[in-house]
Image (cartoon, grey):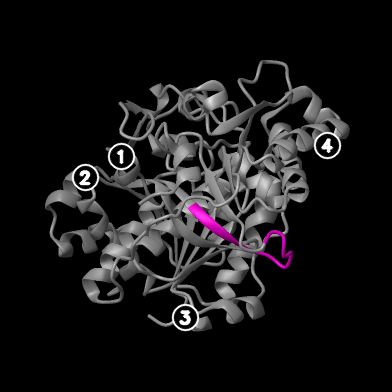
Amino acid sequence: MTGDRQAIKYLWYGDDFTGASDTLATFAEAGLKALLCLGVPDLGRLAAVGPFDALGIAGAARSMPPEALRREVDPVGRFAQELRITLLHYKCCSTFDSSPTFGSLGEAIRTLEHYMPNPLRAIVGGQPSLGRYCAFGNLFAAAGTGGEVFRIDRHPTMAHHPVTPMSEADLRLHLSKQGVPDIDLVDWRQLDSASDEALDARIAAIEGRAVMFDVLQTGHLQRIGRQLWQSAHSAPLLAVGASSVAEAVIAHWREIGLCTAEVPALEIAPARDPVFVLAGSQSALTAAQVETALAGGSNARYRSVALDIPSIVSDGAAVATTAEQCASLLRQGHSVIAHTGRMTDGGPSQLSVAQAGGRLLADVLRRAPFVRRAGVAGGDTSSLAVEALDIWALGFAGTLSKGVTLTRANSEDKRIDGLELMLKGGQMGGPDLFERLLGGVR
């Protein structure tokens, strides 16, 4: 595959930064060249750093109400149309957490379908590599890496998400509330046993409607990828789902010889300088990761800075004071975790906390420019924190854990250019993730 303007066949938009970077890793781990841009990119910049097999755009639509979401994703659709993209992937969270009022997947589909004339709207419902499974349209998810699997409406975290709690496991019903009616289903039994010809006929019979694909095991993805890529060649296609959409297409590309690259070595060297971590996620898993990194008290490899949430949200001076506290520890050679702790009812909103986290991250990096590796935990926190930095694109630097990518910043600001960033969702990574960020992966 070549990387000129017409040859970028696959474009993905991630509705938060953590998910968008996971798709970046999916392509890089397959030996394909990909770049993740922060907003619709300038074509001149792309030409200077290309070529690419796939291109991503990271956004923050997951935290947006419908009108703001439309303004966010409409330029993505126009960009896809301009580049004559074969397949546009709206990359949502693997848990599909969304609602009619925040991060509406229905609103995204209605906005983007005008630019992708294929009458099929494909929805891929699971990602086994992340412990996400879809059976008869119902979503199940593991609690943490390798953890117990729950139906999504009974998941200990996602059923109680502070912004978009998942109260419905049937994704067809979940999406119908967001204005996507009459979703058809290709269930796992058909993927297991139907012939290619029978699946072709099944998809051909679905006209002008959305279709959901079950995913129970990795073997289903190649069959789904065949259907997506084949349909996309009749007319540009919109697909919705987690990084399993990319996994499916790559599996098919391998089968037909469009992806022949060897899988690269994915080692990450230990950090040479102190590391700064901003932990804004409210998940129990992230809390456990913070606890693990701080275990040992004064002998821990990280120093703890507990954030006073009401103060940093409402008081700019408090942000500056906290940033200086973090930077002072970093200047002494200590790695630092700044963490929010549990939010309480009646306190600042998750959005305002994430925005304050962005200001804090930018201020810490300004005061400690020698920091060349940083991490952000929490999908909304990552999206809004990175927006506070002068970064136009992120390249792949390695995989810390399944679903957790280390990226490298492209920026006109020399202090930020080359900064290594880990952006992770609250449910991603093992207990020692922050230790891996500091110590590397061999």
> Dot 3, crowdedness within 10 Å: few (<14), some or many (≥20)?
some
> Dot 2, crowdedness within 10 Å: few (<14), some or many (≥20)?
some
Dot 1 amino acid type: Cys
Whichever of labels 4 and 2 marks the residue nearer the N terminus, that label is 2
Whichever of labels 2 and 1 marks the residue nearer the N terminus, that label is 1
Q: Which residue is mark 2?
A: 188
Q: Residues under labels 4 and 3: Cα distance? A: 44 Å
Disc number for residue 3: 3
- Which secondary structure, mark 4? helix
Q: Which residue is mark 1?
A: 134
Quarter occupied by residue 256: bottom left
Image depth: mark 4 or mark 1 in front = 4
Q: Residues under labels 2 and 3: Cα distance? A: 35 Å
Q: Are marks 2 and 1 in contact (CB under 8 Å)?
A: yes
In-front residue for pair 108/353: 353
Rendered location of residue 15, percent (x, y): 56, 49
